[in-house]
Image (cartoon, grey):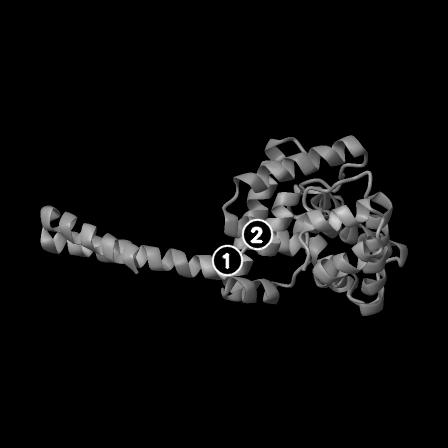
Amino acid sequence: MNLFIAIGDIYDIFIEEAETANIAEESVRRRKRRNTTAAALATASALGIAAFAVWRKKTKQKRLAS
Amino acid sequence: MLDDDKIIDLYFSRMEIAIAETRKKYGGRLFTVARNILFNKEDAEECVNDTLMKAWQHIPPKRPEMLGAYLSKIVRNLSINALQAKKAAKRGGDEVNLLLGELTECIASPHTPENTHEANEVTNALNMFLAKQEKTARVAFVLRYFHGESINNICTRFNMGESKVKSILFRTRKKLRTHLEKEGIAI
């Protein structure tokens, strides 16, 4: 019982984090990022590193513009 | 809805609307914590009211940095006290026992801390432990053992399967046990 009670005194920041965290959304974002990285690596190996650098720059510009 | 600073200012001005604003913003969250422990709507409502009263009595001079967390701690403590006063509620007792049972495995010895100093040590160790965990594990642990959320609710919030959430909690409890042993707590 004491450990259960001791948990009642943890830092406020952990309590707030648990209340407000959107783990589901974050895991979707992480998955998307992983997929993007995988796609980038696949493109890099297909184009060769110099062409990849150009492609990456263009992709980044397009993303920033949108 | 007012932000926390404005609500706290209302308390400092001794304006009773502070209680209504607090209820509007945090009432649902406080009720959930109380109900997860007491498993009784009326008792939970009573604990929420007592929490608001305590906030009124303690603010000022207290100025909580995080009003939501401050109130959650009060309602949790009041709910546990209410549960103990009723000598383990007839309804919901099983769920709380389940929560306690899951945590018991983290403490190797049945001799748990009995004085405040030791209780503070446990809390410090818990804070250190939580700070080191990955966000998902930490949030799951706090939702389960602070807020008393059911596994199903955590699954919904995380958009994960039951076995995944159970496994996260199991691994976290196991790590907690190791951490507490390392800290020399209740061994």
Q: Residue at x 58, y 50 (%)?
A: A17
- Which chain is indicated by disc 1? A
Q: Is residue B73 above or below residue B113?
A: below
Q: Is residue A30 visible?
A: yes
Q: Residue at x 71, y 40 (%)?
A: B109
Is A26 on the left or on the right of A17, as rendered? left
Residue type pointed to by label 2:
Val
Residue at the spot of label 2:
B139
- Which chain is indicated by disc 2? B
Residue type pointed to by label 1:
Ile
Q: Are marks 2 and 1 on the same chain?
A: no
Q: Quadrant of the N terminus of chain B?
A: bottom right
Residue at the spot of label 1:
A23
Is B179 on the left or on the right of B160, as rendered? right
Q: Residue at x 53, y 50 (%)?
A: B137
Helix, strand, or loop for circle 2? helix
Give x and y (percent) for residue B136: 51, 52
Give x and y (percent) for residue B56: 84, 49
Q: Quadrant of the C terminus of chain B?
A: top right
Q: Is residue B178 visible?
A: no
Give x and y (percent) for residue B60: 82, 41
Closer to us: B43 or A20: A20
Disc 1 packing (10 Å; few <14; some 14–19; many ≥20): some
Occupied quadrant, residue B88? bottom right
Is B39 on the left or on the right of B170, as rendered? right
